[in-house]
Image (tube, helix red, strand yellow):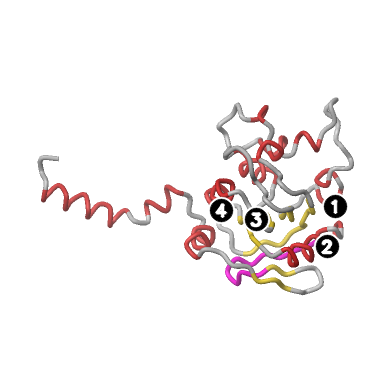
């Protein structure tokens, strides 16, 4: 998993509350277990017309936001079913950070497992960031995970809190398997102890 230390990029505004995982990646795209190729289905029902053409009004289809790395979203982002395809689609599109006032628990946990940083901020801070993100090609934010700080295009900064264990996972780029392997020596020692003390097992 790619490390997340500092990210600078265009932030796209999505001032919609209760964005569920079906909106993030519709069920038609759930037939694959591959993590790649899902970016084309991200927000598909909002991004595309019925004939397959792009909806020019949707934020990620606008020229300034086509390469967005950060999404500034409304409250309760990622609610609904617990599909891991949702963070896969965001990541495949190029989005590595989502900022909101709250996230659904399962989606929030899945983000960390896939190298995406979900940041919870206050409503006042979200309003500021949404304003920053509305500046088109000038909507550049820098997210510094080490400093736990978001810096806007005018130089103003917002501090965010994050669980330190999850922060470490992203800074080191550790998925579940890599995290377990970090304890390989301890696990091996425990197994040897059990074999010695209980050889019948």
| Residue 102: mark | 3
Q: Are marks 1 and 4 in contact (CB under 8 Å)?
A: no
| Residue 117: mark | none
Dot 3: within a 10 Å radius of its alpha carbon, few (fewer than 14), some, or many (20 or more) residues?
many
Residue 200 in the image: state x and y as whole percent: 10, 40
Residue beneath disc 1: 64
Whether residue 92 sits left or right of residue 114 in the image: it is right
Query: Can you say which quadrant of the picture contains the C terminus?
Result: top left
Q: How far is mark 2 from mark 3, CA to CA?
A: 18 Å
Q: Nearer the viewer, mark 3 or mark 1?
A: 3
Residue beneath disc 4: 2
Residue ID at (55%, 32%): 33
Q: How far is mark 4 from mark 3, CA to CA?
A: 24 Å
Is residue 176 part of the magenta span, yes or no?
no
Picture quadrant of residue 28: top right
Farthest right residue in view: 56
Earlier along the polypeptide chain: callout 3 or callout 1? 1
Residue beneath disc 2: 131
């Amino acid at each position: 998993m790619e490390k997340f230390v500092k990210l600078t990029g265009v932030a796209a505004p999505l001032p919609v509350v209760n964005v569920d995982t079906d909106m993030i990646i519709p069920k038609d795209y759930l037939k694959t277990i591959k993590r790649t190729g899902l970016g084309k289905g991200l927000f598909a029902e909002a991004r595309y017309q019925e004939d397959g053409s792009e909806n020019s009004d949707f934020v990620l289809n606008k020229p300034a936001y086509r390469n967005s790395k950060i999404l500034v979203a409304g409250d309760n982002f990622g609610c609904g079913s617990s599909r891991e395809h949702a963070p896969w689609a965001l990541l495949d599109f190029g989005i590595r950070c989502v900022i909101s006032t709250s996230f659904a628990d399962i989606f929030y946990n899945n983000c960390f497992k896939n190298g995406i940083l979900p940041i919870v901020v206050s409503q006042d801070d979200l309003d500021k960031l949404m304003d920053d993100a509305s500046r088109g090609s000038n909507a550049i934010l820098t997210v510094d995970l080490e400093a736990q700080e978001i810096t806007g295009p005018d130089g103003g900064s917002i501090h965010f809190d994050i669980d330190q264990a999850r922060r470490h996972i992203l800074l080191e780029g550790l998925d579940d398997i890599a995290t377990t392997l970090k304890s390989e020596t301890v696990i091996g020692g425990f197994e040897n102890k059990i074999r010695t003390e209980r050889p019948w097992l």
